[in-house]
Image (cartoon, rainbow, N blue to C red):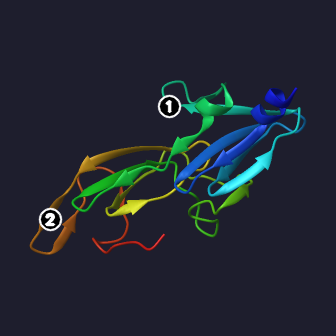
Amino acid sequence: MAENVRERDLVLAPNEFAFILDETKGNVVAYVGPHKTSLANTDRPVTFEERTRRYRRCTLEESITAFPYAEEGWYIVLENPAREGDEEFAKSGPNTLVRLTLGRKVNIPGPATFPLWPGQQRGGRPGKLGASGYQAPEGGDHRGRGQARSL
């Protein structure tokens, strides 16, 4: 019995996040570490499958994901950023959905690390530094102009 109770506890370290589906309402909640919570019987851990763009049920352990990370000279390609006026990145603890700008990509220069909202996708790539500062590669919007972002 103690084993089952332990399996329902979601414990996230700093720089980790997890998506949990509330099966009573259909909402996907983004939990961001450091955080600990006990999940209800109707809460299901899920992951966002980038290829199919759907949520897949998984184990609690599989749902825990490290923040995307870009070191200096690299950038994160963020697909479906939060809309203007909404929280850009989720905060520690449980976070309800924000409106996303679907189909849009932005390039966020490193050093940077942050949790994703449900429905966002990311990738890291090397960037290049030109005479006028950080130059975004082709395609997508560019945020930050090479300045380190405090997250």
**Rendering quarter of residue 71:** bottom left
Is 121 on the left-hand or right-hand side of 98? left
On screen, 53 above or below 97? Answer: above
- Residue 16, image x, y percentages: 55, 49
Q: Mark 2 = which residue?
A: 129
Disc 1 versus disc 2: distance between alpha carbons? 29 Å
In the drawing, does residue 136 fall left or right of residue 51? left
Asked whether 39 or 99 is in front, the reply is 39
Tell me if residue 80 comes above or below residue 147 in the rendering: above
Query: Label 1 belongs to which residue?
Result: 50
Tell me which residue sits at (54%, 53%) in the image.
115
Would residue 69 be visible to someone looking at this image? yes
Q: Amino acid at mark 1?
A: Glu
Residue pictured at 62% horizontal, 35% vertical: 63
Residue 36 % position (x, y): 73, 52
At label 2, counting other C-alpha atoms closer than 10 Å, the crowd grade (few under 14, some 14-19, many 20 or more) is: few
